[in-house]
Image (tube, grey):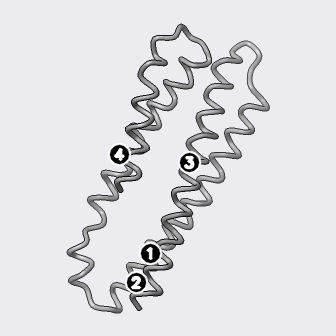
Amino acid sequence: MQILHAWVALNIITGLPGLFAEQTFLYYFSMMNLSWAIINEVVVIWIDQHIKKRTFIEKGKEEQQKIGRHVENMLFANIWLDAAYVLAGISLSLFSVPSHPNLFLAFSWSVILQGSALLILDNFFFFKHLQNRKSSF
């Protein structure tokens, strides 16, 4: 979770100064990244509440394997969702509205950035989870 908290912090630190730009690409890009930071932090808090290490340890081996498969499925679904974000961002950049090019390009690049970063992180967590599962069972 520390990696995700760091990603949120990076989005906030880099996003805040951009809000002082006047409706430029940087302004919209920063605004979208700050929005992503809020969403990502809510997800991190939910995951922290959802997964408690001590409750996992107290479970029997069969229940631990069931939880492990659940986590695996969640990460796998997230990987596909992240890829969809990247594709949506690319589509948004290709079909931006000419009357608001800064808005659409900034939002599309933000979605591409967020989707790519989450795709990398979720793949890392997925393969780390598989390694841990193989070594523990």
Place of residue 31 in the rendered image (x, y in percent of width and height, measured from the top left) = 49, 24
Q: Marks 2 and 3, Cα distance to the nearest angstrom?
A: 28 Å
Q: Is the residue under label 3 in contact with that under label 2 (CB below 8 Å)?
A: no
Q: Residue beneath label 2, please?
A: 66
Q: Is the residue under label 2 in contact with that under label 1 (CB below 8 Å)?
A: yes
Q: What type is the residue that disc 3 sits on? A: Ala
SS assignment at label 4:
helix
Q: Residue at x 52, y 56 (%)?
A: 121
Q: Residue beneath label 4, please?
A: 42
3 or 59: nearer the viewer:
3
Q: Residue beneath label 3, please?
A: 117
Q: In the rendered view of the protein, which quadrant contains the C terminus?
A: bottom left
Place of residue 18 in the rendered image (x, y in percent of width and height, measured from the top left) = 49, 18
Q: Residue at x 65, y 51 (%)?
A: 84
Q: What type is the residue that disc 1 sits on? A: His
Q: Residue at x 40, y 29 (%)?
A: 13
51 or 130: nearer the viewer:
130
